[in-house]
Image (cartoon, rainbow, N blue to C red):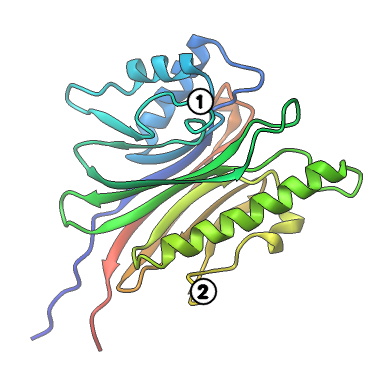
Amino acid sequence: MTTPAVRTTWRPFGGFNVKGVPAMSQRQVLHDLRIIRRNVVVASLQEFKHSRYWSWMRRALPRTGRQPWRSYPDGYRGPRSSQPVIWRARVYDLVEGRQRELHGDQGAISQARYVTAALLRDRATGLRCWYVSAHFVVRGDQPSDTERRRTLLEQDLQEFELFLDQLADTGHPIVGELDANLPGSQAHRMPQVAGNGIRRVRYLGRRGIEYAFVVDGSDVSVETRNVREVADARLYTDHEGRVFGHRLVVRRAR
């Protein structure tokens, strides 16, 4: 008799840059967060850099009621809060949160940038997965850009790759999205493997500026479907969102 594989149901994940420069109004942020809420149960956000954004989030994604939401970090913490992971509390529990500095404060060039990861446990199955959000420095991808910006972007790429290696070494699968500020023509600069070269990083959908990706765990695979863009015409931010279905599947021993 064959034992069926343990798997989660299909769940929508998304990545959204909620424009922070220039800052959006309360009406605009609430509008975009409500669209995000309708499309996903877990998501990575970028540019969520203002304390008032976090106050408005509590209105659009309340912590109580029929569909409560949670986040990591859990509230405004300065630059560390700019790339949070959010999720529906009835679907996931937080097991652990991690962050790594990509680069320190650069004055007028860039705030300190961090990559964020939340290890979430699917409440229906107990399976665990890392969900990741990051944002690299802007205007460092072209030869005409300043050397300082180009150096910062290279540093961001290196620190991000090291962070993915650390997450992959835990054995848990990884699902994420980031605003890399890197055009599709330079997609080869993004990490291709994680966990000391053992696990392939699979990128989903159109590459260019934003990148969605998954990495299988040691015993759990990530299956994906229906990758789609949420057109910026529907959002006040100047970025498209990206949404895809994913589920975790425990691989049977051979």
Quarter of the rendering occupied by the C terminus: bottom left
Question: Which of the two labelled residues, at mark 2 and mark 1, occupies the earlier sequence position?
Answer: 1
**In the figure, 218 relative to 79: above or below?**
below
Q: Mark 1: give few (<14), some (14-19) or many (20+) Cα within 10 Å.
A: few
Q: Nearer the viewer, residue 238 or 83?
A: 83
Q: Is residue 84 above or below residue 208?
A: above
From the image, tell me which residue sits under label 2. 196
The front one of 207 and 99 is 99
Q: Residue at x 35, y 41 (%)?
A: 42
Residue 158 point in image, percent of width and height: 64, 58
Which residue sits at x=44%, y=42%?
A: 14
Amino acid carrying mark 1 in the image:
Gly
Can residue 235 be seen? yes
The amino acid type of the residue labelled 2 equals Asn
Residue 21 shown left or right of residue 148 in the figure: left
- On the image, numbered disc 1 is attached to which residue? 78
Marks 2/1: CA–CA distance: 32 Å
Residue 13 on image: x %, y %:
39, 45
Residue 86 or 38: which is nearer the viewer? 86
Question: Could you tell me which residue is drawn at 69 percent across and 59 percent down?
Answer: 187
